[in-house]
Amino acid sequence: MGDESGTYLSQLLGDRAKVRECRPITLPNNSEPEPDLAIVRPLGRIYRQRHPYAEDVFLLIEFANTSLAKDLEVKCRAYAAAGIEDYWVVNLKNRHLKVFREPVDGDYTRQLTLTTGEIHPLVFPDVRVSVQRLLEG
């Protein structure tokens, strides 16, 4: 899941970021979740020795169908606690994108729900991501 979106985001971001699909990241609490897509700093060979840390992460995206509750609750809290600034959940069942931003004390203080249009990753405000393309998986 997210293969097409991973390719799409790679094309949009070019060499400014690395798109990793279903690969672990390392959070400060030593957990190693495997988000569907992690858009991270392009550190090349460093990722052969270690997984990306929270500070290497620009954006995390989960594609949720049966995992929706886990993605919206457990993972959301874990990512907020780790200081991940931009977390998106693509709800494949209801066809909308939930965007979580501004983590404070283990929770996101800003949430958006989008069904159409474009969204700009926080770190790349010049990049326009089609919500429709993400909803297609």
Image (cartoon, grey):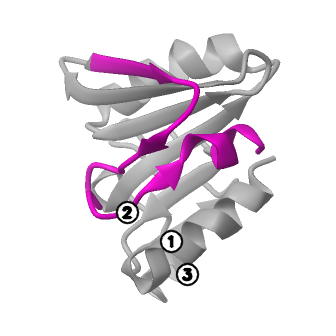
**Residue at the image point whose x is 48% and y is 89% from the top:** 45
**Figure check: 1 above or below 53:** above
Q: Is residue 122 left or right of residue 78?
A: left
Q: Amino acid at mark 1?
A: Leu
Dot 3, how many residues are within 10 Å of its Cα: few (below 14), some (14-19), or many (20+)? few
Quarter of the rendering occupied by the C terminus: top right
Q: Which residue is mark 2?
A: 127
Q: Secondary structure at mark 2?
A: loop
**Residue at the image point whose x is 64% and y is 65% from the top:** 8
Q: Amino acid at mark 2?
A: Val
Pick the front one: 73 or 120: 120
Pick the front one: 1 or 118: 118
Q: Which residues are magenta?
A: 110-137
**Figure check: 9 above or below 73:** below
Label ID, residue 48: 3
Question: Considering only order in the chain, which callout, 3 or 1, is on the residue closer to the N terminus?
Answer: 1
Question: Considering only order in the chain, which callout, 1 or 2, is on the residue closer to the N terminus?
Answer: 1
Image spot of residue 91 (x, y percent): 68, 24
Image spot of residue 75 (x, y percent): 52, 25
Contact (Cβ within 8 Å) of mark 2 with mark 1: yes
Dot 1, how many residues are within 10 Å of its Cα: few (below 14), some (14-19), or many (20+)? some
Q: Which residue is mark 1?
A: 12
Contact (Cβ within 8 Å) of mark 1 with mark 3: no
Pick the front one: 81 or 30: 81
Q: Secondary structure at mark 3?
A: helix
Q: Is residue 137 left or right of residue 109?
A: right
**Figure check: 54 above or below 93:** below
Q: Secondary structure at mark 1?
A: helix
